[in-house]
């Protein structure tokens, strides 16, 4: 079986009243593994993905916003293997396919006050079958975006964070990225999760 948990965090804070600030980060989960059938049997591969975390905006100035795409796609490729006479294996590239999860909520909207909202997706699941040894490649990319808007000449922007199982390190004066003291959550339960498990099946 394959079990992955990816932790991530992104934060922005426009501390001055001179402009706006935004940050964009790409998160990419990638796994590659071989599926080997038992002699005389086929295989079934069960995969699933899930995301859990929080948007946190701290009202220390004007406005902030954070978002994740409403759909996250996991792309996978099954590459059937062929064994050569010397015992080595080569793998023929197969087509790419995908399965998705729905992220709720996908955005905070524009927030001028304190905002702390959990992020939770459904469980995206996909089962595939095969008969020969195969190499499976999985890639799950998605984007995190945060904005901090000032009121020019008057106020800086709010702190804005997306927390996915990782404490941020922007500065001791920024609290929106904190898991322990200011916005408690179980850090071990947050993140992006991918798992895959193989079962033998009769041909």
Image (cartoon, rainbow, N blue to C red):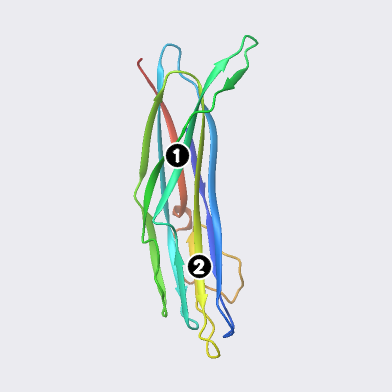
Could you tell me which secondary element the residue under label 2 belongs to?
strand
* Labels 1 & 2 near each other (Cβ < 8 A): no
Left of 72 or right of it: where is 9? right
The residue located at (61%, 69%) in the rendering is 170
The residue located at (47%, 31%) in the rendering is 95
Q: Residue furthest right?
A: 86
Q: How far apart are marks 1 and 2 (CA)?
A: 28 Å
Q: Quadrant of the C terminus?
A: top left
The residue carrying mark 2 is: 146
Q: Residue furthest bottom?
A: 154
Label number found at residue 195: 1
Figure check: 4 above or below 150: above
Q: Say how many tags the image has.
A: 2
Left of 22 or right of it: where is 190? left
Q: Which of marks 1 and 2 is in front?
A: 2
In depth, the one of 118 and 85 nearer the eye is 85
In depth, the one of 96 and 130 nearer the eye is 96
Residue 16 point in image, percent of width and height:
59, 83
Residue 129 point in image, percent of width and height:
39, 25
Tell me if residue 105 can be seen: yes
In depth, the one of 158 and 186 nearer the eye is 158
The residue located at (39%, 61%) in the rendering is 106
Figure check: 158 above or below 185: below
Query: Disc 1 or 2, which lies upstream in sequence?
Result: 2
Figure check: 80 above or below 136: above
The residue located at (45%, 55%) in the rendering is 190
Residue 157 point in image, percent of width and height:
52, 80
Label number found at residue 132: none
Q: Which residue lies furthest to the top in this view?
A: 85
């Amino acid at each position: 079986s394959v079990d992955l948990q990816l932790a991530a965090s992104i934060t922005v804070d426009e501390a001055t009243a001179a402009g706006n600030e935004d940050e964009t980060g790409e998160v990419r989960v990638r796994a590659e593994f071989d599926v080997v059938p038992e002699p005389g049997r086929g295989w079934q591969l069960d995969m699933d993905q899930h995301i859990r975390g929080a948007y946190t905006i701290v009202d220390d100035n004007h406005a902030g916003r954070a978002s994740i795409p409403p759909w996250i796609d996991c792309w996978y490729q099954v590459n059937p293997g062929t064994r050569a006479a010397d015992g080595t294996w080569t793998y023929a590239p197969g087509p790419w396919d995908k399965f998705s999860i729905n992220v709720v909520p996908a955005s905070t909207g524009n927030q001028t006050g304190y905002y702390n909202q959990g992020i939770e997706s459904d469980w995206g699941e996909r089962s595939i079958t095969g008969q020969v040894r195969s190499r499976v490649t999985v890639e799950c990319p998605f984007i995190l975006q945060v904005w901090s808007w000032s009121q020019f000449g008057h106020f800086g922007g709010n702190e804005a964070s997306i927390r996915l199982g990782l404490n941020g390190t922007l500065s001791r004066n920024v609290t929106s990225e904190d898991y322990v003291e200011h916005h408690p959550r179980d850090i071990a339960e947050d993140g992006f999760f991918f798992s895959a498990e193989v079962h033998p099946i009769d041909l």
